[in-house]
């Protein structure tokens, strides 16, 4: 059983998704029950589905100083860094602690593979990529972290985590360990994933993509809607930001039950959730809100619904926010962590957009519509392919 950790302050955070750019646009959308999904207008060939596309990425090329990193994924990262003054907060941390004492831990599932797809579509007669795409750093999984490290001028530990849909949730756990072990004094964490043919047609080949907007936990759900997002948070010891919300705990597990299907009894998910509560020193009844992984796939929702119903009292509220943004894959963990922080900061339980008739496995915890109520403590679940599971626990600063 893990021992409780010392909480860390989440001194800054931001999100950019189909709901808009920055925290205010996300709060407005969650409060008003307004989703951001639209009919697919992205893929290189027709595919009948709905997507969570970020507006304006095409109009935001990287500055000339960072041209080596040019691609859609890094464009979205750049756009995200400039929301809610996050880049200023990160540079301030660099100034206070030193560039070598700020860690960078980012999650992504596809990095800049969209640029690699384009390069292979445009091979010349000799099988070579076009000259403008002969930039090896963008054809590697570390493209995102390499670019952000350069953009922020950070020289501390720099990690890329790619564990499918739990990627940018696990970044919080790695950052806590780096700070606790004295390898860093602060950490920029986050994740970015962008739309590309590989994920759209790949998930469609697995028969997981819904032809209509996704409906998490609905009896008639037909699969996921894929989205894209960028999100970041700054973690520091609590004395640096005593009034900020806090990372209270985290749990991780790898059940390895199946390549793309969760354990039928939610074994790995439950291990991660219980470990998060243990590290936070919490009992289930102290949790005000759980942001569910809730992808709208048949098995994920069934297993997660049963897990929440057997572990939490009826007073705990729970919902999936993927009906708002789509499943943002490697960026889902950070985006939904930000939603959990918004729930705490604004006493808001987001509604479970898209669900009209809840699955029989759902208990009274499921919040179909948004609610205004005291949250205090919120969990965020991220359960990825291959049984890569993570759960984060956040709480408000003590009064």
Image (cartoon, rainbow, N blue to C red):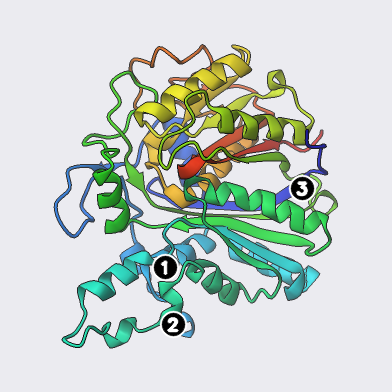
Report the front residue among 126 and 17: 126
**Secondary element type, mark 2:** helix
Quadrant containing the N terminus is top right
How far is mark 1 from mark 3, CA to CA? 29 Å
Q: How many marks?
A: 3
* Residue 317 in the image, given as x and y percentages of width and height: 56, 21
Label whose residue precedes the other's in the sequence (2 or 3) = 3
* Residue 287 in the image, given as x and y percentages of width and height: 67, 24
For label 3, count other residues whose C-alpha is less than 10 Å away and answer few (under 14), some (14-19) or many (20+): many
**Secondary element type, mark 1:** helix
What residue sits 48% from the left and 43% below the top? 386
Q: Is residue 192 left or right of residue 274?
A: left
Q: Can residue 301 be seen by looking at this rendering?
A: yes
Q: Can residue 21 be seen by looking at this rendering?
A: no
Label whose residue precedes the other's in the sequence (1 or 3) = 3
Residue corresponding to mark 1: 75
Label whose residue precedes the other's in the sequence (2 or 1) = 2
What residue sits 35% from the left and 63% below the top? 57
**Secondary element type, mark 3:** strand
Residue corresponding to mark 3: 8
Report the front residue among 258 and 210: 258
Considering only vertical position in the picture, is 203 above or below 221?
Answer: below
Quadrant containing the C terminus is top right
For label 2, count other residues whose C-alpha is less than 10 Å away and answer few (under 14), some (14-19) or many (20+): some
Residue corresponding to mark 2: 68
How far is mark 2 from mark 3, CA to CA? 34 Å
**Can you tell which quarter of the image residue 299 is in?**
top left
Residue 184: mark: none
């Amino acid at each position: 059983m893990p021992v409780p950790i010392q909480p860390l302050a989440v001194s800054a955070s931001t999100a950019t998704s189909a709901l808009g750019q920055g925290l205010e646009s996300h709060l407005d959308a969650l409060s008003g029950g307004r989703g951001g999904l639209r009919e697919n207008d992205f893929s290189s060939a027709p595919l009948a589905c709905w997507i969570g596309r970020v507006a304006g990425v095409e109009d935001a090329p990287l500055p000339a100083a960072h041209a080596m990193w040019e691609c859609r994924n890094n464009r979205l990262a750049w756009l995200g860094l400039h929301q809610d003054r996050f880049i200023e907060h990160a540079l301030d941390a660099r100034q206070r602690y030193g560039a070598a004492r700020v860690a960078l831990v980012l999650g992504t599932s596809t990095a800049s593979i969209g640029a690699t797809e384009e390069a292979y579509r445009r091979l010349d007669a000799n099988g070579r990529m076009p000259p403008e795409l002969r930039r090896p750093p963008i054809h590697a999984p570390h493209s995102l972290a390499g670019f952000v490290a350069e953009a922020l001028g950070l020289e501390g530990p720099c990690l890329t985590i790619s564990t499918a849909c739990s990627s940018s949730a696990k970044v919080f756990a790695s950052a806590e360990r780096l700070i606790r072990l004295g390898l860093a004094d602060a950490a920029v964490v986050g994740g970015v994933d962008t739309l590309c043919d590989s994920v759209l047609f790949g998930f469609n080949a697995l028969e997981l993509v819904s032809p209509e907007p996704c409906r998490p936990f609905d009896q008639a759900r037909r699969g996921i809607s894929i989205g894209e997002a960028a999100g970041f948070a700054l973690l520091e010891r609590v004395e640096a930001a005593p009034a900020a919300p806090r990372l209270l705990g985290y749990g991780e597990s790898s059940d390895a039950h199946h390549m793309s299907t969760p354990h039928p009894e939610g074994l790995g998910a439950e291990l991660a959730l219980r470990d998060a509560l243990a590290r936070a020193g919490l009992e289930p009844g102290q949790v005000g809100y759980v942001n569910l992984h809730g992808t709208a796939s048949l098995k994920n929702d069934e297993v997660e619904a049963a897990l929440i119903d057997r572990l939490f009292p009826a007073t705990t509220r729970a919902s999936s926010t993927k009906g708002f943004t789509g499943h943002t894959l490697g960026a889902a963990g950070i985006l939904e962590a930000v939603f959990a922080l918004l729930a705490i900061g604004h006493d808001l339980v987001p509604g479970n957009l898209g669900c009209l008739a809840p699955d029989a496995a759902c208990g009274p915890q499921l919040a179909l519509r948004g609610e205004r109520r005291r949250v205090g403590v919120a969990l965020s679940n991220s359960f990825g392919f291959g049984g890569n599971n993570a759960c984060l626990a956040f709480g408000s600063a003590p009064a």
